[in-house]
Image (cartoon, rainbow, N blue to C red):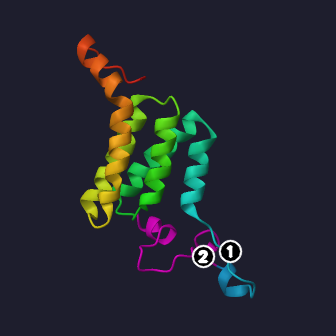
Amino acid sequence: MPSLYRLFPREVETSHRLSTALDPTAAQTDNTAPVTIDPWRVVTDIAKASRDGLSRSLQWLCVFSRSGVDIPVSTYMQFSSLVTKSDTPLANSLLLVNAAMMSSWLKSMGRHQLQMMFSAIHAQLAPHVLDCLKNNSDSADM
């Protein structure tokens, strides 16, 4: 997905995202300052809006991580707090863990900070996972 790299530039590139992804002629014909957008804020705002928004945003996070987009650790921490604070399904936690593991696989440097996220999710889910194992059930709605 080549357009993801334009929207989510790598660390070595500029931190500002120009509006050219939205309107390619705007930066060329207009002398005003370029509009900057923060795509991570958009994704986290949608995640904060509702339970369905959280699920959808976590799916996007998986797509981004599998596509090689560099996802900041702070973004993972925001999603971790949303998943651990709210009563979300077990599937949402799994999406978050999958995205973080894929990011760690593609870029391991600096990802040791994610250990705290994994431990918080594990601490929250341990009782549910043990109940599933005791009852021999596979409840995705936990």
> Could you classify mark 1 by the number of other residues whose Cα lies within 10 Å: few (under 14), some (14-19), or many (20 or more)?
few
**N-terminal-most mark, 2 or 1:** 2
Q: Which mark is residue 132?
A: none
Q: Which residue is mark 1?
A: 35
Element at label 2: loop
State the quadrant of the C terminus: top left
Residue situated furthest top in the rendering: 135
Q: Which residue is mark 2?
A: 18
User: With respect to residue 119, does 3 lie above or below?
Assistant: below
Q: Nearer the viewer, residue 95 or 120?
A: 120
Q: Residue at x 68, y 79 (%)?
A: 34
Q: Nearer the viewer, residue 117 or 31?
A: 117
Q: Residue at x 62, y 76 (%)?
A: 24
User: With respect to residue 104, does 82 lie above or below?
Assistant: above
> Could you classify mark 2 by the number of other residues whose Cα lies within 10 Å: few (under 14), some (14-19), or many (20 or more)?
many
Residue 122: name its quadrant.
top left
Is residue 27 shown left or right of residue 81?
Answer: right
Is residue 108 shown left or right of residue 65?
Answer: left
Is residue 23 shown left or right of residue 117?
Answer: right
Residue 112 in the image: x percent, y percent? 29, 59
State the quadrant of the N terminus: bottom left
Q: Residue at x 71, y 83 (%)?
A: 33
The amino acid type found where label 1 is placed reads Val
Contact? badges 2 and 1 (CB < 8 Å): yes
Assign the magenta stretch its main secondary structure: loop
Q: Residue at x 66, y 79 (%)?
A: 25
Q: Is-magenta flag for residue 5? A: yes
Magenta highlight range = 1-24
Residue 31 in the image: x percent, y percent? 74, 88
Q: Is-magenta flag for residue 69? A: no
